[in-house]
Structures are given as C-alpha cells and as structure tokens.
Amino acid sequence: MHVRLDDPVDLDAFRRHARQLLAAGVPPDRVEWNGERAGGGAADLFGESGESGEAGDAAPSAAPVAAARHAVPASFVALCGDVVLHRDPQRFALLYRLLWRLAHEPALRHDPLDADMLQAQQMAKAVHRDIHKMRAFVRFTRVAGDDGLEHHVAWFEPDHHIVEANAPFFARRFAQMRWAILTPERCVEWNGQALAFGEGADRREKPPPDAGEQLWLTYYEHIFNPARLKVAMMRREMPRRYWHNLPEAALIQPLTDAAQARSQSMIDAPPTVARRIRAPIALHLRPADGTAPADLAELRAAAHACRACPIGALATQAVCGEGPLAAQHMLVGEQPGDQEDLAGRPFVGPAGQLLDRAMAQLGWARDTVYLANAVKHFKYELRGKRRIHKTAAQREADACAHWLDSEISLVRPQGLVALGATAARALLGRPVAVQAERGAWLHERRDGRPVFVTLHPSALLRLADGERAEAYARWLDDLERARGTVSAAIAA
C-alpha cells in the first residue's frame, strides 16, 4: 500500500487514512507513506506501490470501509500533532506503527521504555525546540510596501515544518504590525486581520538591514555581561546554525574574546559609593514646631530630617533649592527626580537638562535664577532595581508647603514661575489648570509676589516625537515672557 499526503503537516488526513488502514487490517509493514509535498498535480492517496511489483495491491479505499473503534490515549493524539511537524520522512510510518501496536498491544501504553514511543517523543521534543528557536531568533526588518504602508519582513530557516503551527503566536504577538516571515519551504503573511500562507522563498529575498538593526546591535552590546558569560550554554541556547541569519552574531566572537579582560577590569574597579547614605542631623538644627529656619543651611538640615509624610523616610536626602538670594526669578518645579535625589541638587536630571537647553537658547543664565521644588523629597515606586517617579499626593504636597514658604521668605525673589500643576497649586493655594492659565502673571499671593504658570519640562519629555517640537516652541515663548515681564508684573 502506498499512501501519499499532499500536505506534510495535514494531521487530519493522516488520521483519516490511518483509521481506514487500521479498519482494513493492513499491518504497518505493508504500508509505504509519502508525506512530502508533490511537485505536480494531485497524487493518488491510495495506489499500487511502485516498488512492490504486486499487481493486486489495490487500495481498500476504493469502497468506503467502516472504521472500527480503537481507543487510544489522548496523549497519543497530541503526540501525533507534534510528530507530523517533524522533517523525518518516516514519521508517518512510525505513527501508524504506534497506532497499530496500541490497538493490538494494550500493554504498550504502560511501557515508558518502548523504542518506538521514545523515538516519537524525541521527535516531538525536537519540534518544540524548533518552535521555540523560531520565536527567539526571528528578526524583522522594516520595508516599504507597495500599498505605501510600513511592513516588517523576516527570514528564518526552520529545521522542521513549523511555520503553520507557529504563525498564530506571531499574529498574537505582533497584532498591530503588517509582517511576513519567509522560509525556504513555506511563507506566512499577516495583514492585520488574517494569516495567509504561500510557497517557500529564496534567501536572496531577505530584506537588507534597516536603521533598527543598528539600534538592536547597540542594545545587544550594552546588555552583554562578561561576568556571567557561559560559552557552552550560550551555544546550546543559540546554536551556530542560526548565526548567519542573526545580526548580533557578528558581535558574539569579539565580545566573547574581550570578556575576560572586561571581567578583570570590573574586579579591579574601585567600589561604588552606597546610594542611600544619610548624613547625621544635629539635633539643634531641627527647628521647633512653628519656628521658621533662620537661613538656607538650617532649612536644608531641617527638611532633610522631616518625617511629616512617608516620602522623607524613603528618599536619599531632601533636595532644597539653589541659586542667589534676592534673585529676580524663582523657578519652582514639582519634586526632585531620581538623579536629583542622588545628587542633592534640583533640576540635574533629564527635565533639568531640557530646562538648561531652553534657558541657553534664551540667553538666560541658570546662575541668575533660584531653582526649587514644591516637594522636597523624591517619591517613587520600585520596579526591580529602577525607581519610577510618582506624583506626590496633595497631602504630601501640603506637608511640604511650609518648607517652600520658608524658602521664598529667605530667598526673597521678585517673581515666581510655577513649572507644572503641583508647583502652581503650592504657590497659589488652589487647583490650577495649567493649559488654561499658562503664559500670564497671576496676582493672588498674600505676599504680593506674582506667579507665572507654565509647563514642567518633564511634560514635554512625555510627548510623542511629532508633538514635541511645537510644544517646546510654545514653552520657550512662555519662558521668554516670564523672563521679560517680571518687572512690569510687579509694578502692576
């Protein structure tokens, strides 16, 4: 008997024909299976074996055969689903032999050391491993499609027939992308709604590198940890046969060669200073309740020791303002960030760097203004080893309000610039809609100092790239207006 399956991964067709053969009592050694794709037209599913030379080997499928009921374990059905994806041309013969034996040798299902069953399980493991490697090593490249949209194309060379089985994973993982995965025998495309499969492609159709590849190489080089390098394990997880399709493979050998020297340099490097070291606070520097600090040094020491809210217990240190006394402007932000908390200085992180850039464009020297924050301690949420900024609650901002008032009294600025909603509320004592009230001096404070409201620089950093340039230009106009009109605002 010669059985040919047009599709090498058609499990339903295999099960249908295997049931017919089993019902007809055809033993495994009388069946020849061909599970590879035919190059021409439709092939006979059952026909005479070209090698047997027996003219009477007609298929029992010429007339319907009543399939006998043969119960097999559910685990065997799942095993068949994996094994049919294997590239071994004898996989169908193995599965039919196991099916025949399960029907005629009930003890087989309880034999964990049977050679046929072990071979099938090893083939299933190889398929699972290939599926995992495809998910790990597919690298998409951006290309412009004929429809004018951005598409992502990848080239991969699987060991087994896993493209159809693996495609739903990529459709779920990259549901918002239009992508295609090309392989030598089978290709799959996702248009955002449905999967489409086609014949294999030539490796020359692999798209050339794009800008994202260099970004990925830079990332890969920076996350490479020489102290944790295990070459044998790395090659087991990333076999060499995949390297010629992986852009990062060009970096593996140079990074591996330099690993020992880099590890030694890490050992020889001096120890880093601990992040959370608190300076001792002299008791006489802590002001009594209701007593304002006499100068900025006493203010910093007292704020450092403040525990009126939980933030102070977790931060590295209090971050008070810096700048000249009697400055024309005091710029007030929300609270220190991670870098400010470690350095003990305001506006030294990404938001501060953006503020420095804007002031430099305006010709506004940083050392002519006093920079401060409404909240003096860094509030954050731990995610692994990273400290992610969290906005201070109103109760926490109110607990810091007297420190900001004391700072204003000691510095004596002519005008106050509120950077963001938290600072505006702390200075004006009411909720402030920044977008509605930005760009003008407000006269509401009891001490007579005018308040100018605008965005905090961190708000610009959170914008999308396409929106940032326009928002930055408008923010620059705000700062220019605040800088040039403070005298007129005071006179008003």
Image (cartoon, rainbow, N blue to C red):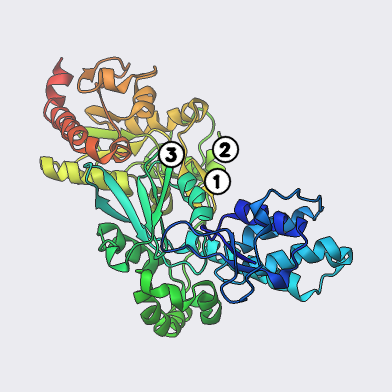
489 to the left or right of 208:
left
- Say whether disc 2 or disc 3 marks the residue closer to the N-terminus: 2
Q: What amino acid does circle 3 point to?
A: Lys
Asked which quadrant contains residue 232, the reply is bottom right
Q: Residue 141's x, y, as percent?
A: 31, 57
Which quarter of the rendering shows the N terminus? bottom right
Q: Classify mark 3: helix, strand or loop.
A: loop
For residue 310, the mark is: 2
Tell me the crowding category of disc 1: few under 14, some 14 to 19, or many 20 or more residues within 10 angstroms, Cα based: few
| Local crowd size for mark 3, using a 10 Å CA cut-off: few (<14), some (14–19), many (≥20) | many
* Residue 262 visible, this orientation: yes
Residue in the picture at 75% in, 68% down: 27
Q: Which residue is mark 1?
A: 314
Q: Amino acid at mark 2?
A: Pro
Q: Which residue is mark 3?
A: 376
Q: How far across and down, in percent of the image, does residue 293 sit? A: 43, 36
Indicate the quadrant where residue 376 lies: top left
User: Could you give the CA–CA distance between mark 1 and mark 3, rounded to whole angstroms?
Assistant: 12 Å
Above or below 192: residue 291: above
Give the image quarter of residue 264. Answer: bottom left
329 vs 8, nearest the viewer: 8
The kind of residue tagged 1 is: Leu
Q: CA distance from mark 2 to mark 1?
A: 7 Å
Residue 475 lies, in percent from the top left, at 20, 32
